[in-house]
Image: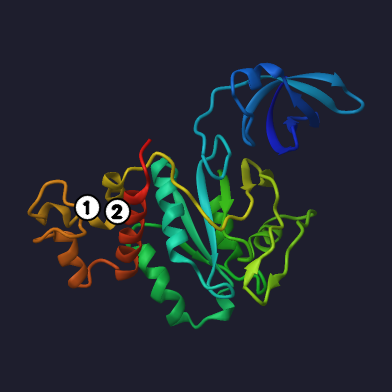
Amino acid sequence: MQGKIVKGISGFYYVHIAESGIYECKAKGIFRNQKIKPLVGDNVDAVILDEREKTGNIEKILPRANELIRPAVANIDQALVIFAAAKPQPNFNLLDRFLIMMEYQKVPVTICFNKTDLVAEDELHAFADIYAACGYPVVFTSAKGGYGIDEMKAVLDGKTTAVAGPSGVGKSSLINCLQQGRQMETGDISKKIERGKHTTRHSEIIPIAEHTYIMDTPGFSTLNIPGLEKEDLQQYYREFADYEPYCRFQGCSHIGEPDCGVKQALLDGKISALRYDNYKLLYEELKQIKKY
């Protein structure tokens, strides 16, 4: 029977089979031998071992439309990255890393700023408009006040969406607002370090409406971009493209070269200093990675 993996914990995979329910399954040893790991979101062929106990085995993983490195999920239509507008303050370097990783994997992204009730509107737009100007859809929400939930539902409608974000931004609370009859564990913010406890410990698919699913994924505090070269980084900063033709040198890194169109656009206020500073930090980080 065909089904979809909706959750995976400690070697057990929970497979949803339409009109039959969810079965607790083990993956065949052949997957380990082939170094293939089933992912949440995988469509699979499963053999039912015990109908009453709802157990089975995964026999085959069907071809994936896509596969994300982190969060480690398959067959998604888009990603929704959630950051808090305050408490904790948004980490824009981490946001840029996430956007680069999704661009690298050709996954569309919508950015959500939650806890908008904690900041003034002009402060909120001061940083949100930077990303909207780069072509990223941005939504504003307050899980506490119920603000922006309908707009978020419209973004999610008819799609399978991977939801990710650092701990403590209210991700679980937002997901609770999106669904009925199921409440996730929510964590407290550590007042000392303003970093949330990891309340989501595994990726899981949650049905929101007909043909609408979200994949809740564990909170992240760091994000690596495997396989990315420093020379490639600029192509993941969309706003650079319009100004690169004005660079004197082909293959300009936009760091130290003279007559750089991107740096001139920065001076002219056409490119965000926040984004450019993150670009330089990430470029230097990639430059320092030792090649083996």
- Location of mark 2 (residue): 238
Q: Amino acid at mark 2?
A: Arg
Q: Is residue 75 left or right of residue 290?
A: right
* Residue denoted by label 1: 241
In this rendering, the answer to whether 6 lies above or below 157 is above
What scheme was used to colour the molecule?
rainbow
Q: Answer few, some or many: residues within 10 Å of disc 1's Cα (few below 14, many 20 plus, some between 14 and 19).
A: few
In the rendered image, is residue 157 in sight? no
Whole-percent x, y for residue 150 in the image: 59, 62
Quadrant location of the N terminus? top right
Point 84% across, 26% down: residue: 55
Residue 6 shown left or right of residue 222 in the figure:
right
The answer to whether residue 197 is left or right of residue 86 is right
Q: Secondary structure at mark 1?
A: loop
Q: Is there CB contact under 8 Å for labels 2 and 1? A: yes
Along the viewing direction, whichever of 55 and 250 lies nearer the viewer: 250
Rendered-image quadrant of the C terminus: top left
Mark 2, secondary structure of its residue: helix
Query: Residue 280 or 245: which is nearer the viewer?
Result: 280
Q: CA distance from mark 2 to mark 1?
A: 6 Å
Q: Residue at x 73, y 64 (%)?
A: 187
Q: Residue at x 9, y 50 (%)?
A: 249
